Structures are given as structure tokens and as C-alpha cells.
Amino acid sequence: MRLFGFLVLISGVVLGVGCGGGGGGDSGTTPAGVTSVRVTCTPATVRSGGTSHCSAAVAGSGNYSTAVSWTTSAGSIAASGVLTAPLVSSITPVTVTATSTQDGSRSGSATVTVNPAGSAQNVHPIVVDGGPPGLGADYYVNGLFTSVRVCEPGSTSRCQTIDHVLVDTGAVGVRMLSAAAGGQLGLSLPAHTASDGNPLVQCMQFLDGFTWGPIALADIYLGDQLASSVPIQVIAPADAPAVPSSCRNTGGSNENTLSRLGANGILGIGLFLEDCGDSCAQQALNVYYSCSTSSCVETAVPTARQVQNPVAMFSNDNNGLIVQLPSIANAGQESVTGSLVFGIGTQPNNGLGNAAVYTTDARGNFTATYNGASYSSSFIDSGSNGIFFLSAAVTGLPACQGIYSGFYCPATETTFTVTNTGRNGVSGAVTFSVANAQTLIDSKRKAFNNLAGVLAGRFDYGLPFFFGRNVYVAIEGRNTPGGVGPYWAY
């Protein structure tokens, strides 16, 4: 069953390190009154000259003022927090900062991504920036995020733009944290039902944990692209049934809160049309459940009613996508901006060019060969925050300890060369470096091209693999200039 081969991330949000992706300025002695300022801007992505509404959450103790003053790195911002974006000719990140009027040392910031007015309709911005402001003093290392507009089916007014949704090419489907779980989604979406008429609820399993929540129908906008009436998972709404033991016992942690998930949701845009496929259609597994008022029972679900890949449901540019991120310095960067380009060979801006095509098996895997040994369950996954591969005994790298556990901590940066081979026989060498994860993370930067960790018996080419190359994701059964998906190309 394909979904067990994927993961959102390994080692999750790095706790107790750095300052969160929406606030800062908490240094020195804390004065009485204001202790922190957190900023949220909605939408987090706007067109050139457009507007975004920013708000500040001021925390403190005793008598403190919630008043703030606003500044922006570009464009203009009103005293009310309404940002008017600058006129731009390329995708531009704009930093909006709110500073306490009571204590000028207390401030918080958020990033608004501005798209050029004439940008192609199949281009959508992405960012690596440490995660949503709600993480507080923690941050997400190498998390790739975007904004997703979610609407009640058929409506253009009953909508929410959800920022800091994790972009995950190693999974399929939209999953949004409900407001009750610490996320932003508060819409009234129609429930998706099981064959017996009961609400359909999912235990979505990743290598590091699971999410639990009902399936609902929503219109999903990624920029100008619309996927209508998409089955999505709403994670842990207030009225969600209790997690059954067969879900809890799948291994890993329950990621049904913002602090555990590290994002307001997941945008699964991997190789497949739906998240489980024929396995869940042909038999009742501990993935989909029919939930009555008294119990939840495992149930089979036809593929068309499973959680769907929204890109495959676009009216055009629906055969795949490209993840585009620039090269970054080995020392890391505070933030990185890039693009999702929808479609492969459907418009002038999404051709394959010289990219090599690596076809996969039914689980999205290909073979990686290192030091004479082959690992046939290897894959590419923007939702993993490092390149995770093999064991310390095989790599010769020391593993990190404590809160850095799961990553590698070599004394000096080490280079590896691996040969990837698709099921079509196409082979190519990949070279990457592994630096000391503790040193990288302690720098408090958010984006790294040399962060790596342990995953015995396979290669998981996580976010560091994406920096400096265009990575193509071809959806199963869809025709492209490189052949019929599923395949990766780069």
C-alpha cells in the first residue's frame, strides 16, 4: 500500500532551538508587560500591487498594551496592518514587522510572497522560512511551505487562505489542521461518507506518525488553478471521533496538533492520483474508517472517493508539476523562495528540457546504489527535511545525540556520490554533502542543502536534494513528453 512508503518529515520540528517563523526579538532581560509579538498575514501570497491583512498577537503579563506599529520591507502598510504589496517583476518576499509601542525591543514578523502581475497562471510561490507563527519559540528546519485557498464547494466567498501548508511530494492529498487542533481551518465543509452512509474518517500513516480526522469536500485553489470538490482530510476537528486503537498502534506519534505537525496542513502533490489506491479499494485496512456515533470500523473505499491529488484534478496542467528552488550556500540561509510550476510540457514554462526521466514502481520508488549495494526502495520527498539514508554503520558517519537524534553529526563535511536508476533503466550519479546537523541547526538558519540523517535500507532524497535543481513529478497514468507517469525527472 503506497502511503506507507512516504513520510512528512523525520525528527519533526526541532524543539528548543531558535525563534519561530513568525516572531523574534526575545533577547535580553524581559521587561514587565509585553513578552512577545506574533504576526500573521492573510493571504500570505498576493499579486503585484495586491493587499494582505496582517494582524499582531501581543502576549504579556500584568498590565500590558496590545498596540503595535507596522513596518514593511517593501510596498506600504497602514496603521491597521493592511499591506499594499509593491509592484514587482519577479516573485518577491516582503517582510512585515509589528513592534510593540510599549516596548520597542519586542517585535514579530511574517513573510508575504508577492507574485508579478503578469506571471503565468500555472506558477505558485513556495518558501522555506521556519514554519507558521503558531509554533512559537520553535521552528521548522528545511520545511517547504505554500499557501492554499480552501473554499466550501461552489462558493467564492466562504473561503480561507491557509498559510504555511507543507509541500510534500512524498504524499498525496490535502490535509488541513482544524482550528480546534491549532490550525486555521474553520469552514463548514460537507462530510464525505463511507458506503454505509456513516462519516468517512482517515488514519493517514507516515513513517514518523499519523493524522486522524474526517474526510470532507472542498474546492482547492493553488494560485489561479482550481480543483473542485476535492476529498481532503480535516485533522482533529472538535467533533472528531476518538482515535481507534488500530490507528494508534500503527507506530509513531499522533500529529494532530500544530506543535506536532509543524505546519497548518499538508499539500500532498506526489506521483499518484489518490493516497492509498487499489489496496484500500479492495480491502478494509486501518487507513479509512466508517464512524458511527458509537464506534469506528475499518472500511474499503473506492479510489475515486479517497483523498485526491489536487493537481490531478485541475482542468489543465494536470499531468504533474515542477518544484523549483535556487541553489543556496553551504552555511544555510534564513529563508528561500521558489515556485511550483504545474504541468509538464503543457506550456512554454514547463518543458522537460534536458531533465533525465526516472520511472518508479507502484510505490514511487527507484533504486539508489552506493558503495556497490543497491537500495530499491528509494524515493524523492520534499516533505522530508533532510536527505535520510542508510545507517551510521554503513555510512561511517556519527549519529547526533539528544534533540538532534536522527540526524548525522560528522566532524567535517563529507561528500557522497550515489547512482540512481529508474525502472526504465536510466541511471545518473547524484553528489551531496553531509554537514554536522547540530552545528547547522544551532546557527538558527532555516534552510540547508547539507542536512542529513539516518534511514536504514533506503535513500530518502528530502528537501536538500531540491536546492539548485528543477525536480519534476509526473502523475501516474498521465501523458507527458517524457512518457506516462509515474516518474521523477531532474
Image (cartoon, rainbow, N blue to C red):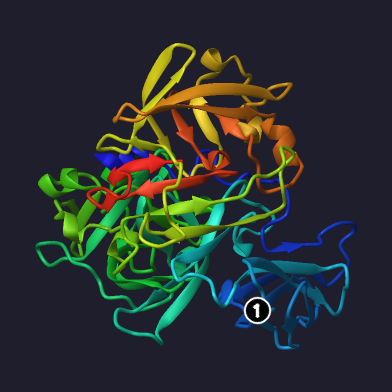
Does 229 appear above or below 2?
below
233 sits to left or right of 387:
left
Where residue 60 appears, x then y in whole percent? 76, 71
Q: Is residue 333 visible?
A: yes
Q: Nearer the viewer, residue 92 or 434?
A: 92
Q: Residue furthest top?
A: 372
Q: Which three-letter amino acid code belongs to the residue tagged 1?
A: Cys
What residue lies at 58% left-to-right and 47% top-to-bottom? 13
What residue lies at 78% left-to-right and 83% top-to-bottom? 67
Q: Nearer the viewer, residue 119 or 38?
A: 119
Q: Quadrant of the N terminus?
A: top left
Count up the numbered dots.
Answer: 1
What residue lies at 55% left-to-right and 22% top-to-bottom? 417
118 sits to left or right of 270:
right
Q: Is residue 164 visible?
A: no
Which of the 4 image quarters holds residue 487? Answer: top left
Q: Residues within 10 Å of mark 1 (few under 14, many from 20)?
A: many
Where residue 454 appears, x then y in whole percent? 52, 27
Q: Nearer the viewer, residue 42 or 107?
A: 42
Does 211 appear above or below 150?
above
> Element type at marker 1?
strand
Which of the 4 image quarters holds residue 114? Answer: bottom right
Where residue 268 appears, x then y in whole percent? 39, 54
Where residue 333 appears, x then y in whole percent? 72, 48
Does 387 appear above or below 127?
above
What residue lies at 28% left-to-right and 44% top-to-bottom? 483
Does 120 appear above or below 318?
below
Look at mark 1 in the image and give the residue it sits on. 54
